[in-house]
Image (tube, grey):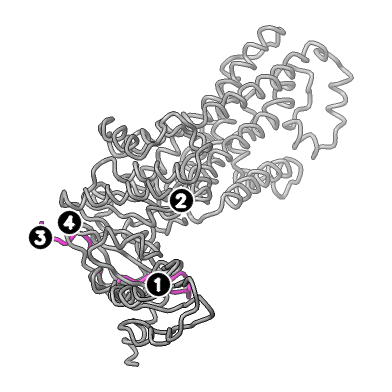
Amino acid sequence: MGTEVLADTLRDRRRSLLWWTLGLVALVGVTVAFYPSIRGDSSLSEYGKDLPEGLRALFAGGELDIASPAGYLNSQIYALTAPLLLLVFSIGAGSGGIAGEEERGTLDLLLAHPLRRRDYVIQRFLALLTLVAMLSLVLLATVALGSLVVDLEIGFDRLLAATGSVALLAAFFGCLALAVGGLGPGRARATAVAAALATAAWIFDGLGQTVDALDGWRFLSPYYQALGENPLREGVPWDGWAILAVGTLFLVAIAAAGLERRDVRQ
Amino acid sequence: MSHPAIATDGLTKFYGPTRGLEGLDLRVEWGEVFGFLGPNGAGKTTTIRLLLDLIRPTRGSAAIAGHDTRSDSLELRRLTGYLPGELKLPERRTTGACLDHFAQLRGGVGARAISDLAERLGLDMSRRIGDLSKGNKQKVGVVAAFMHDPQVLILDEPTTGLDPLRQQTVLDLIRERAEAGRTVFLSSHELDQVEHAAQRVGIVNDGRLIAVETMAKLKERAVRRVEVRLTRETPGLDRLADVAGVRDVVVSGRIVRLTVEGAMDAVVKALAELPVQTLTSEAPDLDEIFLSYYGSADGH
C-alpha cells in the first residue's frame, strides 16, 4: 500500500487544520481563563445542584459541583464543547473522504489510477485519524497549559484520559460518515447520518442518567463508552476505548467493502 | 502480445431499468487508433468507465491486454491512461502539484515526461487549477493520461474545450503513440474529431454497437449538407440532382442547398461550370450516418 493518498489528504487539509486550531485554542483558552473568576463560588455550585437532572446530564456532564476543577473542565469543555468541535471536524473529514470526492467528481480519475479502493479507504482513514489526533493534541495542550496558568489543579493523566475519549468518539463518528460514503454516494447523506447518530448517542446517554429504565442500556451509546464514566475523575475507561476502537475499525471495513463493491458515480 | 489491446464480450450495463450499454463485443488491436462514435448518451462513457473498472458490468466482461476489468483491475489500470469525459480536478492545487500527485499514485513518472507534454500543450505548471480555463484544465487531463506512456490510452472526448491548434497537438500525440505500437481508444460525438486519427470506428447508439467500419468506408457514408451561393441566378440547377451522391436539391434564388453522400468530387466538378461565389460545407452529420446504418440493418 502506498502513502500518497494519506500525504495528499494531509497536505490538502493543512489550512483547514490551522483554522480549526485557532478556533479551538480561542474557545477552550477563554473557557479555562474564566476559571479563576468562579473558583470557589458557592452560589455557582448551588446553581449547578439546582439544575434539573436532565439538563445537568446533557449540558454539564452530570456534574454536581461545576466550580471544582474537574467539575468545571468537564461541564464547560469535555462533556459537550470539545466533543462537539471534534465531532464536526471529524465528520467533515469522514464525509469528505469518499462521498465528498465523489460528489466533486474527482474520485473518478483518482480511482482510475493503479490504487486499490480499499487502500484508498484505509489511507483516508489514516488521514482522518492523524487530523483528529492533531486537533486533540491542540485541545490537550491548550487545557493543560491554561490550567497551569490559572492554577487549576487537575492531573495530566486525567486530561489525557478525557482528551483521548473525545478523540476516539470523534474518530468513531468520522468513520461512520466515511462508511456511509463507502456504501453510496452523497456527501450530505454521509454527514447527516453521522451527525444525527452522534446527537442521538449524546441525548441517549443524557436520558440514561435520568430515566431509570434506560440506565441499563447506556452502554449502547458510543458517547457513554467515551465520556459516560467521566474520565476526568475516573481515568481512562479502557473497556469503552476498546469498544470504540473496534467499532471504528469495523466502520472502516464497511467503508472499504462498500466502495469495493459499488459503481463510482461520475 | 497475444491478447488484443481491448476485448469485450457481451459487455452490458443497466442503471436500474435504464440501458447504458448492451451486448458489446469489441476487439481493438495493438497499434490501432479506434474511434468510438455516437451521440451524447449513446453509451460511450459507460463503455469507457466499465473498461476502467469504475463501474461494474451487469453482464459480460472486458479486458485490456488480457487483464480482466474485475479480477485484474489493478494491473489493468497500471498500463492504461485515462482521460475522463467530464474531467474534474482538485481546484485548489497548482497544475504542477496535481500532476505530481497523479504521478506519485503511479509510483513516480519521469519529471521530463510531464514537462515535455506540458510544453507541447502550452500548459503553465504554476497556476492554480481553479483559475484555469476549461481548455487549460483539459490539457492537465491530457498530460495526466499520457505522462506514463501507457500501453493503452482511453480518451473520452479528448479535444473538448481545446482550441483548434491544441486539438491538433492532441491528435498528433495520439498518432505518435499509435505509431509506437500503443493503442488508443478515442470516443467522440463528432466524426470530425476522430476522422484524421482513427483507422477504424465503432458506432454506438442507444447502448448498442451498430457497426464497426474502417474510416474509409465510413466516409463513403458520410453525408454533408452543402450550400452554394451563386453570383447570379442560373437556370437548370435542378440537374445537380443527377450528379452522383447528390440529393435533396433545393434552389431559392441564387442559393442552392443540397446533400452529398460520400466523396465531394463529382459535385465540385459539376459546380465548376457555375458562377460560384461561395461554397459552404458543414461537418458530416452523425445522425444521417446512423440513419443509413439503421436503414441497412432493418433491410429497408
The residue pinned by badge 1 equals: B286
Quarter residue B238 falls in: bottom left
Instruction: Specify the segment rendered in magenta.
Output: B1-21
The three-letter amino acid code for the residue at tag 3 is Ser
Name the residue nearer the viewer: A165 or A167. Answer: A167
What's the magenta bit mostly, secondary-structure-wise? strand
Q: Mark 3 — on which chain does it sit?
A: B
Residue sticking out furthest to the left = B2
Q: Which mark is residue B53?
A: none
Dot 2 surroundings within 10 Å: few (below 14), some, or many (20 or more)? some
CA gap between label 2 and label 3 equals 37 Å
The residue pinned by badge 3 equals: B2
> Is B8 inside the magenta-drawn segment?
yes
| Helix, strand or loop for disc 4 | loop
The residue pinned by badge 2 equals: B161
Q: Mark 2 — on which chain does it sit?
A: B
